[in-house]
Amino acid sequence: MNSACWIVASTRTRLCHGRRILIEQRSGFRKVSKKTERVEVETLSNTGSRNSIAEPAAFSRSSILKKLYKPFLFTVGFSGCSFGAAAIWQYESLKSRMKNYLDDARADWLEKLRPAKHGDFRKQVNEWWNSLSDGQKTVSGIIAANVLVFCLWRVPNMQGIMVRYFTSNPTSQNLCLPMILSTFSHFSLFHMAANMYVLWTFSSSTVSILGPEQFLALYMSAGVVSSLASYVCKAATGRFGPSLGASGAIMTILALVCTKMPEAKLAIIFLPMFTFTAGNALKFILALDSTGLILGWKFFDHAAHLGGALFGIWYASYGHELIWKKREPLVKIWHEFRSSPPRSGGS
């Protein structure tokens, strides 16, 4: 639960191919103590030519702040498109369920008449899939995407692309696309495993509250909102460096559940004997990240955490009413578009 969007505290980055190393700050990512989880993005080196993907060492805060209008517009546009697509997806899903209800019932009836197959791997997979909750089914695709990106970090020839597009940094030339791609990016196995465990744990509760379509729209929007919060904080404080991880989006999901169900009992996986309410857990997380942001702690991207958590609280309190419940006009337009007869090509 305490996993985070991890910051790379560096001013320049150099990339080579081969064995794994950490380069000093003047030519790459800094190295931290082995006693703590390594939060920097490790670079790969080999006996070959070096391919620099560094950003300039000196940045002007004012110039960076002026560039942030693009990420802001991207956040608004991407979030709006996410909720719009979710509303249309929900409409199509409900329509498809109603249309295929009798066909599904007939298929289930015929399946019962057929003799049971033993040792059928496909059947076992279907049984396992059907045993999952709607929330677990919904986040399975998110987890698969994170695992795929994690594997891409291990491909030496992909390192330049991964740092450029799968880490968010306000000093980078690519500002918008990394805001969402970095949400699916983890370099450390522990970082990814902890984040995906929290997402899996809270998926059932969140999807039961929102539904799968609204949940995915909120999760994707939370990724860009937390990245925007990280951008603003880095530009304001001058603490530049790449960040990656799903923790900002997961903080939104966690904050929403804690706001909706503040009396729910939670526990830490390694200390199940200690329980606490969801409301107290949310207060502790907000206090911890606020302290880290004020004191300039570099282990986590506390601005992304706070941005994600505050977005989750806002959505649980006001956003659902302001955004999701006002989707009917869009759904009506889509319904009329789908129901309108096709136009003939002749005169």
Image (spheres, rainbow, N blue to C red):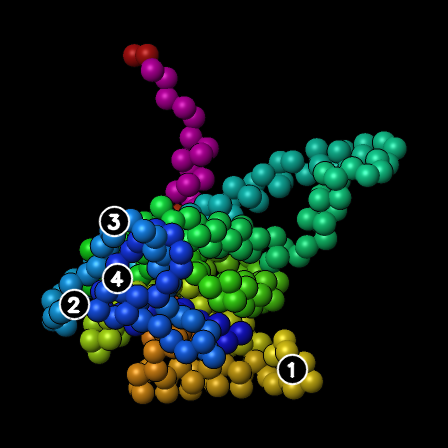
The magenta-colored residue range is 331-345
Q: Closer to us: mark 3 or mark 4? A: 3
Q: Earlier in the sequence, mark 2 or mark 1?
A: 2
Q: Which picture quadrant has residue 15? A: bottom left
- Identify which residue, 142 or 86, lies in the foreground: 142
Q: Closer to us: mark 3 or mark 2? A: 3
Q: Closer to us: mark 4 or mark 1? A: 4
Read off the residue under disc 2.
Answer: 57
Marks 4 and 2: in contact by CB < 8 Å? Answer: no
Under circle 1, the secondary element is strand
**Residue type of the residue flagged with mark 3:** Ser
Q: Earlier in the sequence, mark 2 or mark 4?
A: 4
Q: What x and y, as percent, mark residue 26? A: 21, 69
Instruction: Indicate left or right for 174 with 95 as reference.
Output: left
Q: Earlier in the sequence, mark 3 or mark 2?
A: 3
Read off the residue under disc 3.
Answer: 49
Q: Is residue 338 magenta?
A: yes
- Identify which residue, 329 or 169, lies in the foreground: 169
Q: CA distance from mark 2 to mark 1?
A: 43 Å
Under circle 4, the secondary element is loop
Q: Closer to us: mark 3 or mark 1? A: 3
